Image (cartoon, rainbow, N blue to C red):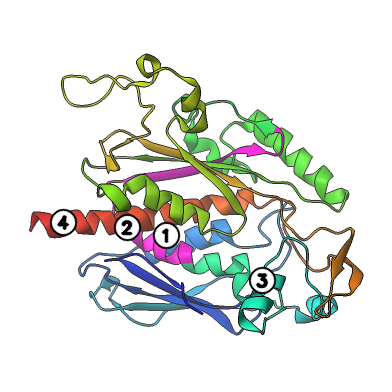
Amino acid sequence: MAGNTFGNLFKVTTFGESHGVAIGGVIDGCPAGVTLNLDAIQQELDRRKPGQSAIVTQRKEPDTVEFYSGIFEGITTGTPIGFAIKNANQKSKDYSHIKDSYRPSHADYTYDQKYGIRDYRGGGRSSARETASRVVAGAIAKQVLSDIKFQAYVSGVGPIKLGKSHTELDLSLTESNIVRCPDPEMASEMEQYIKQIRKEGDTVGGIVSCAISGVPVGLGEPAFDKLHAELGKAMLSINAVKGFEYGSGFAGSELKGSEHNDLFNTDGTTKTNLSGGIQGGISNGMDIYFNVAFKPVATIMQDQETIDKDGNIVTMQGKGRHDPCVVPRAVPIVEAMAALVLVDYWLMNRTIKK
């Protein structure tokens, strides 16, 4: 299986399955001499871990990261950083009923057809549990980029949408509620909606928005390595993501050029920021902001018709511990992937300037 490494200069390779002994990763290319706050890395994992509230999966995992290399006395050495997170609460028997059947809208069928074998316990490698390793790597990337701030938040759950930009919100309120929506009123509405969907044995999707401030001018490469293209790839690599838009996004297609152009101030900043902080594929120093759309979780607690490995029509019902809505736990994952993209381009710029 290929495709387990992300990045060019700051490379992250992840390993492990949902119900294996552990998940983890190796970071290659992290600069030497970075003093790491290991507690801050664990805090990022705690924001993503299961069982943290009444509206997420109740799988109980401590998600404690253990570092094995690349860090000495709290400082990066420049050598590969190896780490692992042990799986402590597997219930593989919850998946015995799908050993020979394919769950609708999961990777079960495609994995079986491509590899001729699949780990049916929680989806194996296709499980969103893999993203915990990305959060560790992203947390380290954030500390390398200490002058850049990443702030993701939930801006939509099903039909409930914030309808405000990041500049109109107090993003410091994001962690004040279990939905991770910076508008307390809307957060309460979203929470109740998720709980109702869960009672129905169903799931719902949503939107995570992200704002990145303090980005220097010049990150990104023209043509095929545009900054927004790499951000799009990063977000679309996250489980359950179905869409990505940055700046004015699809709404920009409805505007005239005279309405959409970001006019300059004398210092090079712009009066508006419909470009989303990126022009010509290169950061322009303004805030980068984007939206990431997540589909409803595919496992629902209702009977569904599907097929088994022999092509027979069978009926199955979802079992196990699953999120009724993934977006609250996806917030730190979105931030992590954004940080991995920016640290890679930051290192490229540093290499060019040398």
State how far apart marks 4 and 3 are (Cα): 41 Å
User: Which residue, given by chain and number where applicable, does mark 4 sit on?
Assistant: 350
- Mark 2 Cα-neighbour bin, 10 Å: few <14, some 14–19, many ≥20: some
User: Which residue, given by chain and number where applicable, does mark 3 sit on?
Assistant: 110
> Which of the two discs, 1 and 3, labels the residue nearer the N terminus?
1
> Which of the two discs, 4 and 3, labels the residue nearer the N terminus?
3
> Which of the two discs, 1 and 2, labels the residue nearer the N terminus?
1
> Which of the two discs, 2 and 4, labels the residue nearer the N terminus?
2
The label on residue 2 is none
Compared to residue 173, the image places residue 120 above or below, namely below
Query: What is the three-letter code of the residue carrying label 4?
Result: Arg
Q: Residue 204 placed where, x, y %?
A: 74, 46
State how far apart marks 1 and 3 are (Cα): 37 Å
Query: What is the three-letter code of the residue carrying label 2?
Result: Gln
- In this rendering, position of residue 172 left or right of residue 159: left
User: Which residue, given by chain and number where applicable, does mark 2 sit on?
Assistant: 143
Q: Count how many numbered circles sit on residues in the image.
A: 4
From the viewer's perspective, is the residue at label 1 or at label 4 nearer?
4
State how far apart marks 2 and 3 are (Cα): 37 Å
Are dots 1 and 2 in contact, CB under 8 Å?
yes
In magenta, the rendered stretch is: 134-159
User: Which residue, given by chain and number where applicable, does mark 1 sit on?
Assistant: 40
Query: What is the three-letter code of the residue carrying label 3?
Result: Thr
- In this rendering, position of residue 140 left or right of residue 241: left
Would you identify the image quadrant in which residue 137 lies?
Answer: bottom left
